[in-house]
């Protein structure tokens, strides 16, 4: 599995954009990059995933570096509900279809009112 | 649409007792998973199933057993509870798209303490 490095914690103010970085320099060319988040006392929640191109959905945007060694999850306007632990998880495109998720330490995002 | 439902939400066990953690999903997903999360740590995969009647071990299967007799249910059995099994247990399910695009949906978790 590709190794990921994320900041232990980040802080933001409400309604400001947040950029959460992830370094995955050992990622293979066939690994998708998934992001999940875990709100306090809840199970993880899927946020977004991508392979090479930048991706947008209703929750967030994912910017993937051209060399694919890093990616950034972008929350365009943080709300208090976005306070969570964010996990960056590479998943092999060519691996087992059950899609094992390997959770690291993640980034604890604090959002201030 | 309930998604993934786990019961109970909380449980305290004595050392050596047994219990079954229940997990049910109503999304007709083929794949189901059990994870555990120790305080301040990421999740670790215990067991998974790719369909009814098929199960396999994950990273940390020792001390646990599973069965999958229906598509909807995936119970996790602890036979002889030990303090090291104090953790939060999450069940998840997915359609099983494969190709690296598999998206998992998680339950709210079961908080288990073994004393």
Image (cartoon, coloured by chain):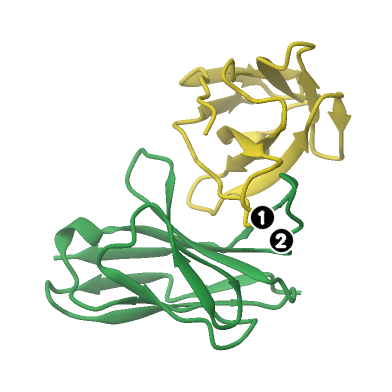
Q: Residue furthest front?
A: A94
Disc assigned to residue B86: none
Specify whether disc 2 shares its chain with disc 1: no
Q: Is residue B105 above or below residue A60?
A: below
Q: Circle 2 is placed at which residue position?
A: B96
Q: Circle 1 is placed at which residue position?
A: A97
Chain green in the figure, letter: B
Quadrant where the C terminus of chain B is found in the figure: bottom left
Q: Residue B21: x, y in percent?
A: 40, 76
Instruction: Specify the subunit that label 1 lies on.
Output: A
Quadrant where the N terminus of chain B is found in the figure: bottom right
Crowdedness near tag 2: few (<14), some (14–19) or many (≥20) residues, C-alpha within 10 Å: many
Chain yellow in the figure, letter: A
Residue B30 sits in quarter? bottom right
Q: Is residue A65 left or right of residue A11?
A: right
Identify which residue is drawn at 58% across, 67% down.
Answer: B32
Identify which residue is drawn at 86% across, 40% down.
Answer: A58
């Amino acid at each position: 599995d590709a190794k990921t490095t994320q900041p232990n914690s980040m802080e933001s103010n409400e309604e400001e954009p947040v950029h959460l970085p992830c370094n995955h320099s050992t990622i293979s060319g066939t690994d998708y990059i998934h992001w999940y988040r875990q709100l306090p006392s809840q199970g993880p929640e899927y946020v977004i995933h991508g392979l090479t191109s930048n991706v947008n959905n209703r929750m967030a945007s994912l910017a993937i570096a051209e060399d694919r060694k890093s990616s950034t999850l972008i929350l365009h306007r943080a709300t208090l509900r976005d306070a969570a632990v964010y996990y960056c998880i590479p998943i092999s495109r060519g691996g087992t279809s059950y899609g094992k998720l390997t959770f690291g330490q993640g980034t604890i995002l604090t959002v201030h009112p | 649409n309930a998604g993934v439902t786990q019961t109970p939400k909380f449980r305290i066990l004595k050392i050596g007792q047994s219990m079954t953690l229940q997990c049910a999903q109503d999304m007709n997903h083929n794949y189901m998973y059990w994870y555990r999360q120790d305080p301040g740590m990421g999740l670790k995969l215990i067991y998974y199933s790719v369909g009814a009647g098929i199960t396999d071990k994950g990273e940390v299967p020792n001390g646990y057993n599973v069965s999958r007799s229906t598509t909807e249910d995936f119970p996790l059995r602890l036979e002889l509870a030990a303090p090291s099994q104090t953790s939060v247990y999450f069940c998840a399910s997915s359609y099983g798209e494969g190709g690296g695009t598999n998206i998992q949906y998680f339950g709210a978790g079961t908080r288990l303490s073994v004393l």
